[in-house]
Image: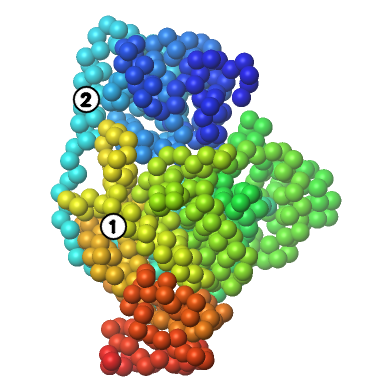
Amino acid sequence: MNATANAENRLGREKSPYLLQHADDPVHWYPWGEEAFFSAAREDKPIFLSIGYSTCHWCHVMGRESFQDPAVAEVLNRAFVSVKVDREERPDVDAVYMDACQALTGSGGWPLTILMTPDQKPFWAGTYLPPRGREGRGGLVELLEEVERLWRGGRSGLLDLGQRVADHLTREEPARASRRPSRALLDAAARQLEEEFDPEHGGFGGAPKFPAPQKLLFLLDRARREGDAGALAMAGHTLTQMARGGIFDQVGGGFCRYSTDRGWRMPHFEKMLNDNALLAYAYLEAYAQTGKPYYRETACRTLDYVLEELRLPGGGFACAQDADSGGEEGRYYLWTKEEICAVLGDQDGERFCTWYAIPSQGRWLPHLLYEPQYDQAWRRLSGQCRALAQARRDRGLHRDDKVLTSANALMIAALARAFRVLGEERYLRAAESARIFLKTRLMDPDGRLYLRWRDGEAAVPGQLEDYAFTCWALLELYEADFSVHCLKSAVKLADAMAERFWDEARGGFYRVGTGGEVLLVRQKEVYEGAHPSGNAVAALALVRLAKLTAEERFRTLADRQLAYLSGAAAEYPAGCCFGLLAVAEDLSPRPDLLCAAREVPAWLAGACEEYRLSALAKTEENARSLAAWAPFTQPYPVPPEGMALHLCRDGACFPPVGSLEELRRELLSTPVETR
C-alpha cells in the first residue's frame, strides 16, 4: 500500500488481497464489521456495500472507473458509509446479499453492489455500474445522488423496501417433508440433465456456460452404477469438448472459470482452485471408467498446473489467478502468430498455429475445437506448449495467495483420487503436504477450523463448507494411504460439524455455526451453483463415515441428512447433483473390505479404486488407534504372516482370503450366506 494512502480508508491493515487492492482508493472504505455499522447509525447514513474478489475482471473495471475517481469518492464519502467485502473471505455475507440481489433484480454477479440501511437491510441491488450513465443505462453517481436525496428528504420508501426485502430473506424455511432416498429421485435428476444437455457442444444450458463438475460426476456415477450409456455419453462429450476448447488453457494447463459462449471457445479468464480440483476429479473418474488417455492427460495437466502455479511454500494452495494482465482481460492467454513464431521459430510456430487455430492476423486464444486429431496434440506439441508457457510468464499475472480451507480440501480430494487412479506418488505427497498445512495453520488445537490463511494469519471462523469439504477430503485421503490419523480427523470434524451446524428441528446444516456472527438470516444451502453445497458434501462424508466406522451416531445422522436432502431436492433434483451422489452411494453401497496385515500392501489403494471397495487397513502398528475410531475392527486379528482380507457385500460376508488373486475371485463370484 502507498504510504500516502487516504487516512480515512481503513483497508490498509487487512490481509485480503481484494481489500488491499482498494486500500489506496479515495473512498473511505470500511471492512465489514461493527465499526462500519456503528458509524452509519451515528452519522445517519445508508451503507454502500461492494462485494467482489481479487481475480474478478469486472471488479477491476469498476474499481478503476469508479472507486479511484475522486468525484465518485466525494459522493460516497459525503452521503454513505462504504463497506468492502471479499466474497471468498465472507461467503456467508456474500450469500445473503446475493439472495437480496436475486430477489430485487432476478439476477446477480460480481461486483455485487448493495445499498442498505444502517441495520443492514438492503433496498437496492445490482452488479457492475459505470460511474456515469451512458447508452441509456444509469450510472453510479446518478444512483448515489438520487438515494442521497431520498434519504434526506423522505426515506420512508427506502426503509419500507428494505424491510420487505429483509422479511423475504428471513421468512421461515418452507416446510419440506423429509423423503426416503429413492432411485426415482436419481432418475428424475438424470431426465432433467438430459433435457438441459447441449448435444452439439456438451454442457448444460446456453451461454454463459459453467462446467458444473458436480453434474458430470453425477452422470459418471450413474453410468458406473446403472450401466447408463446415455449418462456416460453426456458426461464424456462435455469433458471432451471442454478439454478441446479455450476454457482449458492449452498452453499451460488448467481450466478457466466459465465459457462466455456455448461452445467453450472463449472463457472468462480467471482460474480458480476449486474449479480445477473438481474438474480434475471428474476427468479422473472418466478415465477410470473409459480408459481414454485424453481424460488422463487432461486430469494430469490440470493437477500439474495447480502444483506449478498455485502451490505455496508449506504445501497449501493459493485460491486463484487473475483474469486480467496489464489491465486487459485475457491478455496473458492471447497470442498473435508473430509472437508464437518469435518464441518457437518459424517452422514450429507455423505447426503450432495450424493445430491450435491461430490465424495470421489478430490476437487469438489457442484451442483444438477444429482439430480432428485433438487427442494427439499434447503428445506431438508438448514441448512447444511448455516453451510458450515459459515465455508468457514475463507478462505477469496476479495470484490471490490466500489459502481457503474449503478449496484446499477439494484439491486434497482430487490429489488423493489421482494417486488411487494413476498410482503416481507425487500426487499423494502433495495431498499429504496440503493436509498438514490445513492442520497446522487453519485448525485450532481444539479442532476448530478457520476459513482462510494469509501472511501468517488464520482468520474467520470456519463455515459448513470448510468442515464438510475437509471431512470428505480426509476420507478420500484415507482411501489412498490408509493412515488412521485421517480417519480420526474426519470423525472429529464430523462430530464438530454436527454440534455446530446441525438444525435439530428441521434437519440439514446451517452455513454458519452456532455462535457465529448474526446476519439478516442464518442460511442453509441446498441447491448448487458452480460448486457443490456444504449440505451435499456433508451428506457424502457422513454416508462414508457410517460405513467405515459402523458407528450408530453417523448412521443416524446420515439417514436424517439424506432424508432432508431428498425432500429439499424433490422440486429440482438436477440442482442437487453432488447430494445425489450421497443418495446413490447409500442406495448402492460399495462392498466392505478389512485388510488385516503386518503392513498395508502397496496394491490396496489401487485395487479398492478398481473394484470400488470401502476399505480399512489394520496392522500391528495401527490396531489400537484404528479400534478407537472403528471399534468393530477390534476382534479381527492381524495374522503373524501374510494377510487376511475380509470382504462383505450385499449383506453377506465371505471367509477371509490371503491374496489379491483370491480377493478378485471373490469379487467376481456370487455372494454366499452371511456367516
Residue at x 49% of width, y 90% of height: 640
Residue at x 46% of width, y 65% of height: 485
Give above or below for 92 relative to 409.
above
Q: Distance between the residues labelled 1 and 2?
A: 32 Å
Percent position of residue 57, x then y:
54, 34
Q: Quadrant of the C terminus?
A: bottom left
Q: Residue 117, located in which quarter of the rendered image?
A: top left
Q: In which quarter of the image is the N terminus?
A: top right
Percent position of residue 124, x then y:
32, 24
Q: Mark 1 points at which residue?
A: 573
Q: Mark 2 points at which residue?
A: 163
Residue extending farthest to the top is 153
Residue closer to the observer: 585 or 490: 490
Compared across the picture, whether 496 is left or right of 245 comes to left
Q: Is mark 2 on a helix, strand or loop?
A: helix
Residue closer to the observer: 445 or 579: 445
Tag 2: amino acid: Gln
Compared across the picture, whether 668 is left or right of 264 comes to left
Percent position of residue 62, x then y:
51, 25
Compared across the picture, whether 613 is left or right of 432 comes to left
